[in-house]
Image: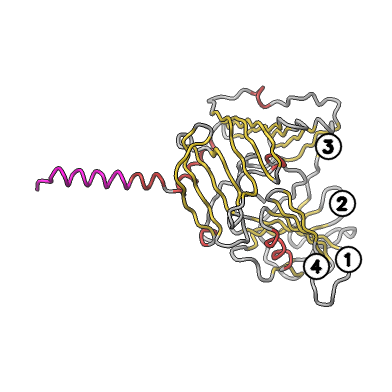
Amino acid sequence: MMVSARATAFLTAALAASVATCAEDPRSWLERMEHALATRNYQGIFVHEHDGQTETLKIVHRVSAGEVAERIVSLDGSGREVIRQNGELTAYFPDRRVVLVERGPEQGLLLTDLLRLDATSAQIYRVGAEPSTRVSGRAAHVVVVEPLDDLRYGYRVWVDESSAMPLKTQLVTATGHVVEQLVFTELSLPARIPDSALLPAVSARDYRWMRHAEETPVAAGAAAPDALWSAGHWQSGQLPPGFHLTANSMQVLAGAHTVVDHLVFSDGLASVSVFVEPGATAPDAPPGAPAPATVTQVGSSTALSTVVDGHRVTAIGEVPPATVRAIAGSLREGFSPTGGPAELSAFGFRAGAGNSPGRRH
């Protein structure tokens, strides 16, 4: 059967349009971005903005034989820098002449939240795209992750068309207000990065070195020492839509004789860490009313401290204040299914103050 030239042209155009549609799929660009961040060497200068403050930082990120090394340096003010290498995270504070050392995270210090959407989060976030544009002279696809309520933040990510690296990210409220923004003004992808690029710029021989002792996990069912308070199990009432318990562990705080419960709640993208300590006394409150809560916001992070059933409850997450209030207020002492192992981190370097442009707890 003969096929006309017009039909052939139509089929060719339809096929090209189909391929283009797949290529423009916003989820595929998030997947490409995740792969690029996990496998590429990169270095550059980025500007981080939050709470009316602006900071310029330099990053060097190397992947070699499956091992990740990273260095972030503030080019403004204190000149602090953080280096992650060989399983350790070392933070240098020249203005304080202090160095902090602790176990390093498995992911990079920057851009670690890769907007992975599971079946649950896909029901509370809408993923879309905006018209392509340019950032710092590069063509970029704009991916939008929009929350379907005001209990979590959304994201806009400008993904480099050629390298799939995130050139610009914004954390936004449900009404579109930009909470934080990160923009690369310079970005390169060298095939090799020398060891010298990962060395600190300061000589810290006469600095005070502080090593953060690791918290001790308490095994399920194990008896706590007599000197320690035996942490109970906790359960939650009605959580914000989409949030569920993903980790629940007991930890002995470093340098203290107190066992705390550490719970992590997540909707698949946003997460909130909750720490429960014993022996707190609530301020006077009307009968039946919840104890007063103290809420602090720095950039996109919200921290809340309150008293529940005689325990100090601290909830921290990169979510709006209403979300940490709802999660902390839902907790009651009682049986709770064990989640998985969790870690406490006393020090984390986040871009600027510093927050990564994506999600992290």
Residues 112 and 277: in front is 112
- In reply to whether residue 2 is colored magenta, the answer given is yes
Instruction: Report the mark closest to the observer, 2 or 3.
Output: 3
| For residue 195, above or below residue 294 | above
The reply to whether dot 1 and dot 2 touch (C-beta < 8 Å) is no
Instruction: Work out which residue is located at the far left of the displayed protein and give it.
Output: 1
Residues 16 and 34: in front is 16
Provide the secondary structure element on which disc 2 rests: loop
Region in magenta: 1-18
- In reply to whether residue 77 is colored magenta, the answer given is no
- Residue linked to disc 4: 308
Q: Position of residue 349 (x, y in %)?
A: 71, 40
- Residue linked to disc 2: 256
Whichever of callouts 2 and 4 sits on the residue coming sooner in the sequence is: 2
Q: Position of residue 275 (x, y in %)?
A: 76, 58
29 on left or right of 287:
left
